[in-house]
Amino acid sequence: MTYEYTSSEMMTIAASRMLKNRQVCFVGIGLPSAAANLARLTSTPDIVLIYESGTIGTRPDILPLSIGDGELAETAQMLVSVPEMFRYWLQGGHIDIGFLGAAQIDRFANINTTVIGDYYSPNVRLPGAGGAPEISTSCKEILITLKQTKRSFVKEMSFITSPGHLSGGDSREKAGLVNKGPTAVITDLGILEPDPQTRELVMTHLHEAVTVEQARDNTGWDLKFAKDLKTTPLPSNRELEVLRDLNERTERAQKGAA
Amino acid sequence: MTYEYTSSEMMTIAASRMLKNRQVCFVGIGLPSAAANLARLTSTPDIVLIYESGTIGTRPDILPLSIGDGELAETAQMLVSVPEMFRYWLQGGHIDIGFLGAAQIDRFANINTTVIGDYYSPNVRLPGAGGAPEISTSCKEILITLKQTKRSFVKEMSFITSPGHLSGGDSREKAGLVNKGPTAVITDLGILEPDPQTRELVMTHLHEAVTVEQARDNTGWDLKFAKDLKTTPLPSNRELEVLRDLNERTERAQKGAA
Amino acid sequence: MAKLMTLKAAISELVDDGDSVALEGFTHLIPFAAGHEIIRQCKKDLTLIRMTPDLIYDQLIGMGCAKKMIFSWGGNPGVGSLHRFRDAVEHHWPHPLEIEEHAHADMANAYEAGASNLPFATLRAYIGCDLPKYNSTIKEIECPFTGEKLAAVPSIRPDLTVIHAQQADREGNVFLWGITGVQKQAVLAAKKVIVTVEEVVENFEPSANQTVIPGWVIDAVCEVPGGAFPSYAQGYNSRTNAFYQEWDAISRDRETFQRWMEVHVLGTRDFAEFRKSIPLNGKGVAA
Amino acid sequence: MAKLMTLKAAISELVDDGDSVALEGFTHLIPFAAGHEIIRQCKKDLTLIRMTPDLIYDQLIGMGCAKKMIFSWGGNPGVGSLHRFRDAVEHHWPHPLEIEEHAHADMANAYEAGASNLPFATLRAYIGCDLPKYNSTIKEIECPFTGEKLAAVPSIRPDLTVIHAQQADREGNVFLWGITGVQKQAVLAAKKVIVTVEEVVENFEPSANQTVIPGWVIDAVCEVPGGAFPSYAQGYNSRTNAFYQEWDAISRDRETFQRWMEVHVLGTRDFAEFRKSIPLNGKGVAA
């Protein structure tokens, strides 16, 4: 018997599967944090999770609401100051994977979390850069996870906060970036990966029951699909159980703490 | 009744009297350390002593042999890394007094602890700079203590490790240094202070029973004396008792630890 | 030397209109009580500095205390936007807010450089990022050894830094632990320093990951139990996530915001009264 | 990932002739055992890096392992000179030793920059000091904001860093406390890392001022109780000051030195045997 599941659960599970054991992973709050902790509780028990608040090797029992919840501090292997985090650990080159969310993304996996519209008189003022620009340029490899909609997958982006593959091709290398950059974008509809030459995001997986049309309709540019477009393996019962337990514990704790 | 005392005790006591309560003092090992701790145990109980090993607000019960003895660590108010010590605390501008020893000193209170003779084929290779150059340029004021001999008070110095008043006059300000630099040199014979204009060291105090000839004979340059040359006040019994207790405790501990 | 005093006296003595002020805290130990007191005393034209301006900066901005904000991430953590900040940037309400925007790596290094009494920090940053187009304080510097081009940013030297910590002793030495953010650097980089603490203790028990800030680099220490609410102080209280979630509704509308501030901040004498004015019936917030 | 192994295996696998090697420690936690093993394995042409080279570097130099030394204070703390170092510099025995000399502030910042993966460090240093005349790695850099001229020094990136610490756990995570010097920076700046520890423990009890170095930045962890002798490991043993004092006589004369090294270091299989070879009859040292 296989459980029913939501598209949001599918996204988190698909994202969690991208991580490998013993990797050192710099985790963004929200979707990346849920996926990374699911991975830690299932397939990659020895993954090292790092949050920019200075918590290294953290093992939260519940998902943090913010990047600096007490839960992260209390379960961390070590705590360092924020300058040390950015100097020694991130810029120091010790992080394998940077796991980011995004407000907007373009076809080259560039991320905008700063403004929509003109910088000086924006239509929407977003929170800003935070740690993301240097996460995207200092980690050996980047994963991105966000919901796929026409509002978030945009053709023209007014601001690049965190560089993906810039204008494609070798533009990232030419800008002086030596790491791999984004290697996958995991959404509620499927998985996108950069084409090895053009570096444009190509849909390589659709989640079960998601159609090509759905993916196309939820993308602001003319989305390309891989020739061997695959279906993401279904969530296992174990993945769903662990994720739901985690979410339940989180909800219970947040109600209790109020 | 007044105790007998040695010239070395007189030097330490005279040096200890230069410190003021609540000052933050960066302490060199050896003579400065003895004087600073004597001050802490007598007239300036709330002085903050800092050693370059990263020990801040330390209150050793015995004198340390090295800059990083366990005694310093165990009695410190806080311990910081050596980079933090030099970046935040010394360069940060938080130190009132730097208290240095020296192998050689010249008439402008420049210090040499590097080489005697040619740098590349030295007659004597000394230990080198350590923290002294930046102590001498970052603390608000510098005190120096060493024994006065023709070998240590030299006319021509082959190497300036830590700048005093450079070539005198306003040469220190012209070099870009904004702190006071050395304000006193305390020796086993007396106290020297820089002339306000020329910045050349002038003997302002002789210790009891020390003669002008003695001071002159133990100085490598043509030593100047203050018009109102004073006699250093005698060691008090309390000063001598506290210093001797400290030295005895230190000797006992070093024998025991061996 | 740190003097023990009331928060009211400390803000009155140490905050001048026009000051650059860093109320630092990284989710943990955010000095809310001090922010409220600045609002109560109607300080004006402040340049607010903080890596993660959150609700207390939203309140300061909405109440018209700020002329400028220097920041690297301005959101309600885990919830969404800071509506008063957005309203100031998008619609210039209550008046225009100048912004100087950085990334975290930049500000963390700029505080570090400030604490080190250096005029600038060097870091590998902003490659492929559009921010430097809109922030002229971000420059380039060349390594004199390798020729590599790196980012140079001016150090942060606030007129005043305010932090909240767990404990101080009677000498004004301050102890904090848990997530320590950039607080030590922000303190050492500042000209004036106020620290609010959960508790003044006779003796401090050293704990893992403790940070000690000696009293001789602090101007005022003020005992304000729970002074980081709705943020938290590890070992003393937990983060009141519900307040962060409900702030979204309170702050979304100008009038609701103003009424709330009048009742709960301007209408109370201190942080203890503020806390009492908010019924904590399992949800945390009154409207 | 840290592997638990013998010190002999670690030195054999991870030290190559010609490497730049930092055996760091600031009075406290000096990795003597590792230095001895390098001597036993006759490693050559090493560039030795250390802020405070002391007896173990004196031994490495006297035994001909070093081509060059990068340092900022080379003495026998509280005692006087390092005679083997002086003999190498003054009389080129056993062969010439190239020296690259800095001040502490410089090297501390250079390690910090190395740990931060930056090519250089900026500091306010060397004004009025003659060292830059003899060390071309010290350059000048101008602040792009204020125009101030500051010192720029290349970061330190050793091929190998070796430190001694109090404890490691089975995962190879390392814990040290007390005076921590520049060890964490030296480890993070290095390509390869060996840590000798007093003890491998099942569980670590966090203590004040602890430094944690995670196993995933370490190559080898070797259990060597007392491996910092005659230096010390706070909580485990005390500094054997008498050895430092007696080293003066042992090292002053070339033949006395060589005989001592042959008997006590080359003539022993490991640090435990070395320790047994030295009668500790209240004075610490055999001649």
Image (cartoon, coloured by chain):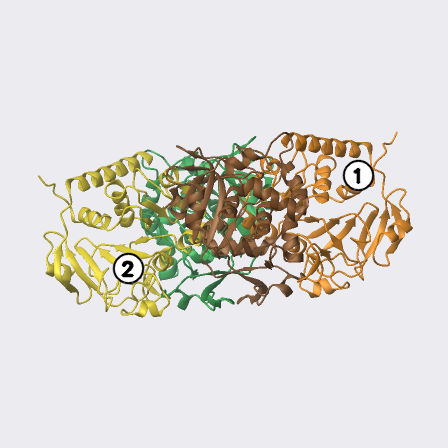
Chain colours: A yellow, B orange, C green, D brown
Q: Nearer the viewer, residue B132 or B168?
A: B132
The chain letter under disc 2 is A
Q: Which amino acid does the dot numbered 1 rest on?
A: Glu
Dot 1: within a 10 Å radius of its alpha carbon, few (fewer than 14), some, or many (20 or more) residues? some
Per the rendering, the mark at residue C284 is none
Q: Nearer the viewer, mark 2 or mark 1?
A: 1
On the rendered structure, is D161 left or right of B90? left
Query: How many numbered marks have been drawn onto this rendered protein structure?
Result: 2
- Residue D119 visible in the picture: yes
Q: Which amino acid does the dot numbered 2 rest on?
A: Pro
Q: Nearer the viewer, residue D241 or A127?
A: D241
The chain letter under disc 1 is B
Counting from the top left corner in percent of width and height, residue B118 is at: 70, 62
On the rendered structure, is B217 left or right of B139? right
Q: Marks 1 and 2: in contact by CB < 8 Å?
A: no
Location of residue C10 by image quarter: top right
Quadrant where the C terminus of chain A lies?
top left
Counting from the top left corner in percent of width and height, residue C249 is at: 31, 47
**Are both tags, 2 and 1, on one chain?**
no
Looking at the image, which residue is at 79% across and 59% down?
B199
Q: Nearer the viewer, residue C104 or A97?
A: A97
Quadrant where the N terminus of chain A lies?
top left
Counting from the top left corner in percent of width and height, residue A192 is at: 20, 59
Q: Secondary structure at mark 2?
A: strand
A248, above or below A84, in the image: above
- Residue C117 visible in the picture: no
Q: Disc 1 designates what residue?
A: B9
Q: Secondary structure at mark 1?
A: helix
Location of residue B22 by image quarter: top right
Q: Disc 2 designates what residue?
A: A182
